[in-house]
Image (cartoon, rainbow, N blue to C red):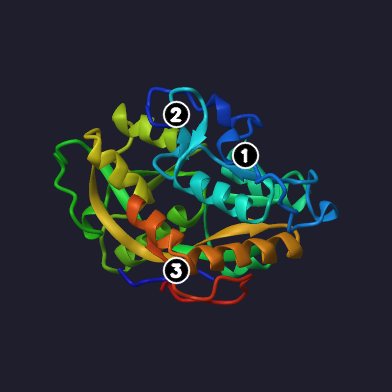
Amino acid sequence: MRRLLIAASSAALLLTVAACGSEDTSSLSAAASPTGCTPKVAKSDLVTAGTLTISTNATLPPMQYLDSSNKIVGMRVDLGNEIAKLLCLTPKFVNIPFDAQIPGVQGGRWDMIDTGMFYTPERAGTVKLVPYEIQGVSVSVAKGNAKKITSEDDLSGRTIAVEAPGYEFDTLTALNKELKAAGKSQITIRTFTTTADAYQALSSGQVEGVAIVESVTSYYQKDGRFETAVKGMNPAPLALGFGKQKPADAVAGALNTLRDNGYLATLFKKYGVTPYTGDLKVTTGAISAK
């Protein structure tokens, strides 16, 4: 498939996603700000003085999800905690559906979006984005892969689920144009409110696959519930999002520190994530998947 740079549940699938239907304002006490440390972002630039309020959607294991005690955990939570620590702020995670996150940061309801949001120039025109990791779109199928889906062409004529229209939806839509041009049947794309809902539909046979970032499909393959049939489609940078410039710049500075001291490399290796090798800064315009 032509590589595009588009100009952009929990640990147990049985858990409901009701927690994402309304804000979960539980603070993660494991990463409280250091004592005797002066916050590096002024109270006038934060929702709450001394606190980095972070939105996420906790339905993407192992990146962000709810553990057995209903606490938000995962790679991006670890990263958010470490960033807050460097900025001498107390992290506070808000669990909210993806489609509410950009309006929320624009409206000053939280300071940072930490949810694996794909970078696009269009999105960078609405919120401040700091790219920091690379992901491709992959497709999970039922265990055993009875329909022998192993390539993008094999998705022709299949029904594939995605979370509410976003990068995965755009990727499949672009693939449909190629399939149509080649005289092949197109993919039926079904959208769901959350990725957990999409996987539930796959589990019950309502769809033949789920398209989501590779780190998630790999997680479900490792635990034996689903298989990764196609991976690495349309790789692109993912970014943290902000409504204000000063918090964005402060977090970019923290990310550079974490790159320099090796924390990012260690974290990404643990979760099988590819680091973004470009500048860790507020970015606009087209960028490459590197």
Who is closer to the viewer here, 257 or 78?
Answer: 257
In the image, what residue type sits under mark 2? Asp
Label placed on residue 276:
3
Q: Position of residue 2 (x, y in %)?
A: 33, 72
Q: Quadrant of the N terminus?
A: bottom left
Residue 159 visible in the picture: no
> Pointer 1: what residue?
93
> Pointer 2: what residue?
67
**Relative to residue 119, is residue 125 drawn left or right?**
right
In the image, what residue type sits under mark 1? Phe
Q: Earlier in the sequence, mark 2 or mark 3?
A: 2
Residue drawn at (23%, 59%), measured in percent from left and top? 153
Binning the other alpha carbons within 10 Å of mark 3 as few (below 14), some (14 to 19) or many (20 upward) gives: some
Q: Quadrant of the C terminus?
A: bottom left
The Cα atoms of the two marked residues, 1 and 2, are separated by 14 Å
Q: Earlier in the sequence, mark 1 or mark 3?
A: 1
Who is closer to the viewer here, 2 or 82?
Answer: 82
